Structures are given as structure tokens and as C-alpha cells.
Image: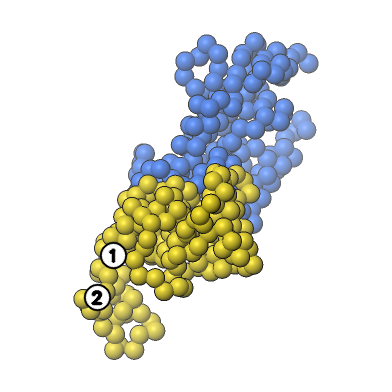
Chain colours: A blue, B yellow
Amino acid sequence: MATIDIQIDDRHLKATPGATILDICRDNGIDIPTMCHLEGLSDVGACRLCLVEIEGVRKLQSSCTTKATPDMVIQTQTDRLKNYRRITTELFFAERNHFCAVCVANGNCELQDLGYKVGMDHVRYPYLSADCDLDATHPQMVMDHNRCILCTRCVRVCAEVEGAHNWDVMNRGFNARIISGFNTPWGESTDCTSCGKCMHACPTGAIWPKSATMGKLEKNPAMIGELVKKRRMDR
Amino acid sequence: MPKKKIATIWLGGCSGCHMSLLDMDERILEIARLADIVKCPIVDGKELPEVDISLVEGAVTSDEHLREILHIRKQSKLLVALGDCAVMTNVTGMRNFFPLKDVIKTSYLNAPSNDAQGSLPSHPALLKLHEKTYPLQEFVKVDHYIRGCPPDADTIFHVLFELLHDRVPDITSMHTLKYG
Ligand code: SF4
Ligand code: SF4
Ligand code: SF4
């Protein structure tokens, strides 16, 4: 198969044409943090954690949505990028209400792991104390907006993999909220098949099963990618 | 070399961080070899003298805590925020989503455990709660942050041991960071 030559962090690499920079990095053991990316779902470049520097391009680019082109020269671990990753992480924690000590996802949360990875010992921005609802109307699951980082993994998995498209995003910026149906209680949804994929795809303690107790949540987001792979006709 | 002085202080927290401090077990003797603990909620001490290190548990919840934290900053060469409440208000910050008077009424009058004899505390000697709780860094410069609810005894020991040897503790790496 034809390959292209690119350079990442001073390493000369061969890549498949059409592959994203993120995929190439992951294939080559180069660690770039992500929250909104999930194997098996389309990429939207929403969380801004995977930004990289590309020589000759003034703006930083999200590596999950940027395809590598021949002779690209890419930096993924500069001080500038690390600084932005820490800032982005802090903003996630400042925007909504994360009380890990009393969270069902404590110890099994991608957002916590991200904080540890970027070395976040405290948040330098004021906490916004957003006024968020909790929707416990679904018989098996709970949606707690206090812990939602708006990665839209739930929206995409429900629309793209389950085909139900129960979730969507309402409003913009600070007021943005994930909604069920047309902003109606999840338990009243006629689209939701109760498959649980959104719960598994959700990287935080925002969507969780009622059967889980504090700190005892178990999720399997990798299952989504496996499912999508198994469904492909050409596998 | 003269022994260094340590103070540990308890603001708006549950004392769990101080329990973790005690969980250092016999390593407290190691600390005591290097420093004198001149103030601590479990020893009797009135005024905070000048100290090299102060470990502060809890958030700033009231007029009294605010006075205290400003005084602590003045008296301390290094101020360490001990535990999630001190760093980000944590459980004590969950009341920030409700008006203070509703919180007080719920606690003292309408609590399910209350026998309808409840009354609102009003003695002049009591501290005056602020409308919201705040982390320490909202008011003073914090030099080091120890995360966790409660923090690990190992991390507390590491921080104290390093600071007492005039080194910078490693508290931002994967194995020492812990939220909740
Ligand atoms: S979702 Fe994750 S980061 Fe947020 S409170 Fe729960 S454990 Fe902490
Ligand atoms: S449980 Fe399944 S169908 Fe229901 S909202 Fe989640 S992903 Fe969609
Ligand atoms: S509920 Fe979970 S998956 Fe959905 S946007 Fe929020 S954090 Fe992402």
C-alpha cells in the first residue's frame, strides 16, 4: 500500500494516506490526550486537548480532525501545547460541578485521569458553579449535567451506532446542555432503546446506571469501537 | 540547625485530613525529629506563632476563617493547602448552590432527625457563615496543594519530609495526585 512520509516530534514516520494525525500518533506510541475522541465514532474536534503544531500553519490544529499530508512536520509535546492542555483541563473542572469525593465515577473517570496526566493540583480559574439539573427519570440510568463536559460522545454513539439519536445539544457556550428528545425528560423518550451505549461512551460520571454505587462505576467505552469494527462488512 | 516549626490548622473541613495526618503513624516521629509541631487542633495552642510550614485543612466558610487564613499567611513561610476542601471547597462547597438561610434552616430546623424543637444558633461567640465557601487560594497565596478527600498519609509525609529538607515536593505526578 502507498504510504506518505511525515515527521512527528523529530521522528520520521510512514503513514497511510488519509489517516488523521491522532491515529498516526497512537499507532506510533505518541501520547496525545483526548476526551471527545472515541474509537468507532466520528471525530468533531470539540475538546481541544489534541491540538498540535504543524510547521507552516499559524493556528494550532486538532489532530483528531486533521489528516496528515506528505512531508508534514508536526510537534505534539511542546511547552506551549502542554500549557494549553493544562488550561483546557482546568476549564473543564471550573465550568461544571465536579465533587469527586462523592461521585459515582471516582477512581474510574477519564476526566480525573486527564487531571492527573497534566499534573493539575489545583484550578487557577474561578469555579462557575453552573446551575445544572439531574435527570433520573430513565428507569435504569441517570444523566447528571453537573459532571458533563459536553464532549458529545453520548450524542454521537446514540445517533451513529445505536441509530436512535435520542441525545442532542441545546444552546451555546456556558448555557449549552445535552438534551434528550426536544429537551424532555429522558424517561419519556420514545427514541431511547435503553441500550446503555451512551453510558459506556460517556467519559465522566455524567451518565451512570442506577445500579452503581459511589466510586463503583464500571464503564467499557472500548466496546463501542469493537462493536463498530465487527459490524463492518469488509473486516 | 534550629528545628523548623510546623502548624496544622483546621478551618471548614471535617477533620478527615487531620486523621490522615495521624495515619502517618510512626513516621510522625520522623517529622518530630526534624520539626516542632507548635500548633495543631489536638494540642492546646492559642496564638499562631511564626512558622516555617502551615498545613491548612478546610475551606474558608466564615468571617472567622477569613481572619484566620489571612493571619496564617502572614505567619507562615510556606502555606500548604491540605485536602480537597482547602483546594477546591469540595463537600463544604456543595452548599454554594443554595441560599445560606435555606441551608441553615434545613440543618437546624427541618432536618429529618430534628424533633421540631430545633432553633437557629445565634450566640454572639459563634462564627458568622459567609453566603458561600471558598478555597484558600481565593484569598491567599498557596505554596503547595495536597489533593484528596482525604489526602493519603503517604503524600502528606512526602510533602512534609521534602519541605523540611528544603526540597520541592513532587505533588503533580500521576502517583501522588488523587481527587476525592
Ligand atoms: S465525573 Fe470524574 S472528575 Fe467529575 S466529579 Fe466525577 S470522578 Fe470527579
Ligand atoms: S441508552 Fe442507547 S438509545 Fe438510549 S439514549 Fe443512550 S445510546 Fe441512545
Ligand atoms: S453526558 Fe457524558 S458523553 Fe455526553 S456530552 Fe456529557 S460528558 Fe460527554
Residue A67, can we see it? no
Q: Residue at x 30, y 88 (%)?
A: B116
Q: Amino acid at mark 1?
A: Glu
Q: A124 or A30: which is nearer to us? A: A124
Q: Residue at x 68, y 25 (%)?
A: A24
Q: Secondary structure at mark 2?
A: loop
Q: CA distance from mark 1 to mark 2?
A: 10 Å
Q: Secondary structure at mark 1?
A: helix
Q: Residue at x 71, y 16 (%)?
A: A12
Of mark 1 and mark 2, the one earlier in the sequence is 1
Q: A113 or A157: which is nearer to us? A: A113
Q: Position of residue A84 (x, y in %)?
A: 48, 32
Q: Residues within 10 Å of mark 2 (few under 14, many from 20)?
A: few
Label 2 sits on residue: B125
Q: Quadrant of residue B22?
A: bottom right
- In the picture, the disc for residue A216 is none
Against A171, residue A214 (above or below) is below
Label 1 sits on residue: B64
